[in-house]
Amino acid sequence: MSLFDVSKYEVPSDHDVDMAATRKNFQTFIREYKNSRERVGQPRIPKVTQSFSLIPPSTAGGQSGQAERLLIQREDDLEAFTELHGLFVRGYCAISHPFKSEVTERRRQIFLLRYMQGFSTYEVMDLVPVGKDVIADESKEAMLQFSHALELTIHTHETELSEQKPK
């Protein structure tokens, strides 16, 4: 018996995942996360450090009095935001490379540019000194890692089973 169960943490291959269904779940989460940020007075896109670590939202604006007012005015919105932000942090931290920290930083940068700011592959190429194929591969891997951490992935066998069920 192994002390570490790899299967619990292994990100599935894109061949084992229904990418269209997973992307839909991913987009739904990102849309709601951005909306919740806006409802509590935060910028739609989270702030990051130069090495692409997240800056906590409470310090992002530098306005501590605003947090108390928001808590009183929009307690439900703040509660939803806190939950979604916690999930976002969990997914964002899952975006990584096992050995190379510079690849982790690049992958997170590409993730933020593509999925949070909505940049095209060519716009990202202007900002990140890698080729189109690397950006496409890193985008897909980042989305899979993020989605897997939040259990948003839909496996192909799940899709096949649901298509076989009689209606």
Image (cartoon, rainbow, N blue to C red):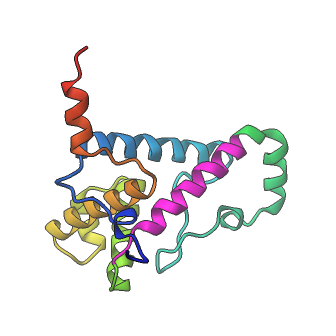
Magenta stretch: dominant secondary structure = helix
Q: Residue at x 81, y 47 (%)?
A: 71
Q: Is residue 92 magenta?
A: yes
Residue 73 at x, y percent in the picture: 81, 39
x and y percent of residue 4 in the render?
Answer: 42, 75
Q: Is residue 72 above or below residue 111?
A: above
Left or right: residue 80 versus residue 127 is right
- Left or right of 152? Residue 85 is right
Q: Quadrant of residue 72?
A: top right
Is 163 a magenta residue? no
Give the magenta part as a residue range.
77-97
Quadrant of the frame with the C terminus: top left
Q: Residue furthest front?
A: 1
Q: Nearer the viewer, residue 19 or 105?
A: 19
Q: State whether residue 117 appears in this view.
A: no
Residue 129, image x, y percentages: 24, 78
Seen from the viewer's position, the closer of residues 133 and 119 is 133
Whether residue 62 sits left or right of residue 9 in the image: it is right
Q: Is residue 75 visible?
A: yes
> Which residue is drawn at the image coordinates 21% and 43% (left, top)?
156
Quadrant for the N terminus, please: bottom left
| Looking at the image, residue 57 lies above or below residue 82 | below
The answer to which quarter of the image holds residue 86 is bottom right
